[in-house]
Image (cartoon, rainbow, N blue to C red):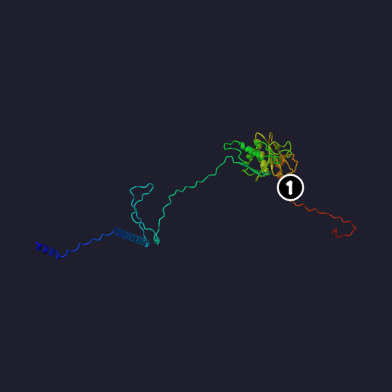
Amino acid sequence: MSSIIITLTLLGHFAPLSAPTPKVAVKKPSVVKKAAVQTKKAAVHTKKAAVHTKKKNVTAKVTTPAPATIALKRQKTASRVIRGTVKTSKASTPIHLAHVPATPKAVTLKTADKRKVRSVKTRRPKTVAYPPIGIYQIHLQEFASIRVYDENGYLRPQALAEFNRINRCLKTGVVLEMDYRLLVELYEAWIAFGMPSVTLFSGCRQAPNASENSRHNFGTAIDYNFDGVTRRELVSWLLSRRDRKSHGVGLGYYPNSYHIHMDVREAHAFWVDLGPAGEKGSRMVADSYHWFATERKQRSRAVEASTKDPEPQATAVNIPAGEPETSATR
């Protein structure tokens, strides 16, 4: 028994050694992640290289000269018809355009501006049925624009107040209530002569700047003229129209002054004053209508007489007999 045990031990001691088991190398997780990232970067790099090559091919296609003849191709119509589009038929044969050399640069199409552009509305001039009259008071150096009538043709109370204000007395500053018929007559004449500038010389004048019986003292008279209109034309127009009035109109013509006189009264009156401007007193003409009608003839005759040269008169010298002639009598 002991011999058997010894032999077995000897056999086990001298038995051939078995090959060692190979060890498996376990990679760390950080190393695996780094490798994955590197592979992704390589893939992105390859994609970029492919895109770059495509762009090069596109630019090469654009820069190459196009053929001289271009055939128009019709795009495929969409299934949905857009409102407002025009349907075109297919061309039987390709249309050859003009021989135009190709542009070396790439052409980019600009998108159409979709903003709405409003059309400019042309404004018509507003027509005013009763335009305001402009009155300039030459002594007060004031201007007033008076709307005499409203849109319906009625006299405005505010117009009368403005007319009273511009006709106040220069010396005393008294504002009288002027007769509204003066404003109506003035406005009618202003419209008839084409709306000229109105220069007002005096309206209300209180004593001692006016006589006690003067109509300027009661607010029923004004002195004025129209710029660009002769006083003779203005007076002749007022004389031709006054018979149509229900009230009387008084007209004073001053050839040597700068204005005419107009007032409202019961009966018509007309006079001509030949006094110089600014002089107190008057030089009334006896027959004012006849003088006014023949004024132009009288002035033309006076001008003709002044232009004619007087004829030279021959002077005879009586020399007594027996006396010698001197140098003075020769």
Residue 124 screen position, x and y as percent: 53, 44
What residue is shown with label 1?
Answer: 302
- Specify whether residue 185 is in view: no
Left or right of 93, for residue 251 = right
Specify few, some or many for label 1: CA neighbours under 10 Å numbering under 14, 14-19, or 20 or more. few
Residue 302 visible, this orientation:
yes
Q: Quadrant of residue 325?
A: bottom right
Work out which residue is located at the far left of the displayed protein and give it. Answer: 1
Which quarter of the rendering shows the C terminus?
Answer: bottom right
Horizontal side of residue 312 vs 193, given as left or right: right
Viewed as shown, does residue 36 lie left or right of 99?
A: left
In percent of width and height, residue 192 lies at: 62, 41
Q: Who is closer to the viewer here, 69 or 240?
A: 69
Seen in the picture, residue 306 relative to 7 is either above or below; the reply is above
User: What residue lies at 61% left-to-right and 36% top-to-bottom?
Assistant: 157
Residue 230, position as x, y percentages in the image:
67, 44
Taking depth in this image into account, of 49 and 18 the one nearest to the observer is 18
**Secondary structure of the residue carrying numbered label 1:** helix
Q: Residue furthest right?
A: 322
| 9 in relation to 262, above or below | below
Quadrant containing the N terminus is bottom left
